[in-house]
Amino acid sequence: MEVILNDNSNITLIYEYAQQALKDVISSRTALNTQLAAVIGIDATLIRFSSGLPDRSLIIDLTNVNIHLNCYSCLWLKILSYISLIISLAFALWGFRPQKGGVIILPEELMEKALQIPEELYRESIIAKWNESIEELGIIINRTGKLLNRAVVFLSVSVILSAIDIILASLLE
């Protein structure tokens, strides 16, 4: 990245823009993490809630040792709903895995450079490092966003399957 050194205001403007862009990217990553946490919470709540619902899909008559299905489809809907919740939970948890994102310039390194070079070059080196960080964080945000989207799709599928199960079980009672 080449910077024109004859106009100090240009490098200052680029520096401020890069600083704000880095803050925006970090803010986006934080928002994605918040959404992932919400999906994980919803998944866990639905797993707990679903396990407490009365189950009309399988009735066991212990006196005659008869096993019969009241609603065979309800059993499959429930199983598919749980599988969807587990897949959603897996995608959301995968989005939380630790990932290296961004370049950190140690203050000690900055002090060494700051005393030996003009301010424009100093800002240019910081901008270059921020640019690397923005690119790395952008890749992480894209990956995490895709995982979040998949988690939400499987969560939605689970909710739809559970709703159909509840409606079908209610109609068959």
Image (cartoon, rainbow, N blue to C red):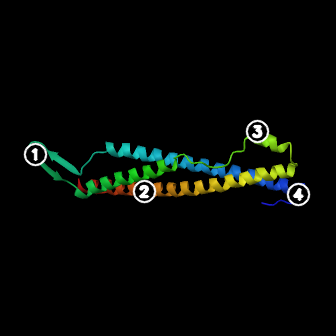
Q: Position of residue 68 (x, y in %)?
A: 15, 52
Q: Identify residue type, mark 1.
A: Val
Mark nearer the N terminus (1 vs 4):
4
Q: Earlier in the sequence, mark 4 or mark 3?
A: 4
Amino acid at pointer 4? Leu
Q: Which mark is residue 108?
A: 3
| Quadrant location of the N terminus in the rendered image | bottom right
In this view, the mark in front (2 or 4):
4
| Coordinates of residue 110 in the picture (x, y in percent) | 78, 43
Distance between mark 2 and mark 3 Cα atoms: 47 Å
Q: Residue at x 54, y 49 (%)?
A: 35
Between circles 1 and 3, the one closer to the viewer is 3
Residue depth check, mark 4 versus mark 3: number of the one nearer the observer = 3
CA–CA distance between discs 4 and 3? 25 Å
Do the residues under discs 1 and 3 have CB atoms within 8 angstroms? no
Q: Which mark is residue 5?
A: 4
Q: Residues within 10 Å of mark 3 (few under 14, many from 20)?
A: few
Q: Which residue is mark 1?
A: 65
Residue at image x 60%, y 57%?
A: 139
Report how far apart the C-alphas of labels 1 and 4 lie in the structure: 89 Å
Q: Identity of the amino acid at label 3?
A: Glu
Instruction: From the image, state whether disc 2 or disc 1 is nearer to you.
Output: 2
Query: Is 53 on the left or on the right of 11, as rendered?
Result: left
In the picture, measured across the screen, residue 76 lies left or right of residue 131, that is left
**Mark 1 or mark 2, which is nearer the start of the sequence?**
1
